[in-house]
Image: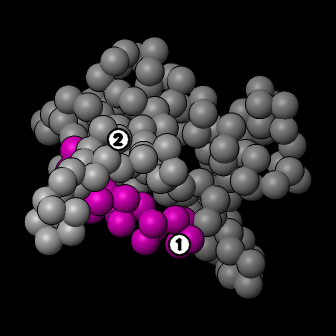
Amino acid sequence: MKPEDDILHEIIKFFSGIFETSKNKKGYGYAIYKEVWLKKLGLRSSDADEAKSSRTTKELQKHLKEKFGNRIKPEAPVAEGMTLRFDTINGGKEIKIDSSKLQAFDILDLETGTAFEISLSDAFAEFFKDVLKALLDSRVKKLYICMRNHNYKGAD
């Protein structure tokens, strides 16, 4: 078992209580939010995907923080505490990165250097940005992108 597997298994277990499978007219299977979960969040199935995604991710982060404590960091800023050195610019002086202006990882396992990105709405829009974030942060050794298969417009 890989060191980060316990967190990954916990994410999968968490989502098994959130989603159920549905099929469109062509028989294409996709994941929809369970009504009981939406009710817990104070949402309806007709509400925007972004609201459902955002609140579900926050609940996952809270759950993982309770289970794993300081091992994980939710909303971990990319390149937090890092500096850059340029030999030819500024006479080789270090330049501090203001990580507050950068994106954040949904979940960062500080023990293993594993970033977990959760994409429950439009995975395609997030994918390239998530890969770039992982490449820019030297703490990240491995990236997991956890995404929901959903019914795209025009798939029927």
Q: What residue type is labelled 2?
A: Glu
| Residue 20 visible from this viewpoint | yes
Query: Would residue 86 appear left or right of 101 to someone viewing this image?
Result: left
Specify the quadrant of the image occupied by residue 107: top left
* Residue drawn at (30%, 38%) of the image: 81
Q: In the figure, 55 relative to 116: above or below?
A: above
- Which portion, as a residue range, is magenta? 123-139
Say which residue label 2 marks.
80
- Residue 121 location (% of width, % of height): 64, 59
Q: How far is disc 2 from disc 1 in space, using C-alphas?
A: 26 Å
- Residue 112 location (% of width, % of height): 18, 36
Say which residue label 1 marks.
124
Question: Which residue is farthest front?
Answer: 91
- Residue 56 location (% of width, % of height): 64, 38
Specify the quadrant of the image occupied by residue 7: top left
| Residue 13 visible from this viewpoint | no
Q: Regarding mark 1 in the picture, which secondary structure is present there?
A: helix
Neighbour tally class for label 2: few under 14, some 14-19, many 20 plus, Cα within 10 Å: some
Q: Is the C-beta separation of discs 2 and 1 under 8 Å?
A: no
Specify the quadrant of the image occupied by residue 111: top left
Q: In the figure, 29 relative to 17: above or below?
A: below
Query: Would residue 18 appear left or right of 15 to someone viewing this image?
Result: right
N-terminal-most mark, 2 or 1: 2
Query: Would residue 22 appear left or right of 93 to someone viewing this image?
Result: right
Query: Would residue 42 appear left or right of 82 to someone viewing this image?
Result: right
* Residue drawn at (14%, 39%) of the image: 2
Q: What residue type is labelled 1?
A: Phe
- Magenta stretch contains residue 77: no
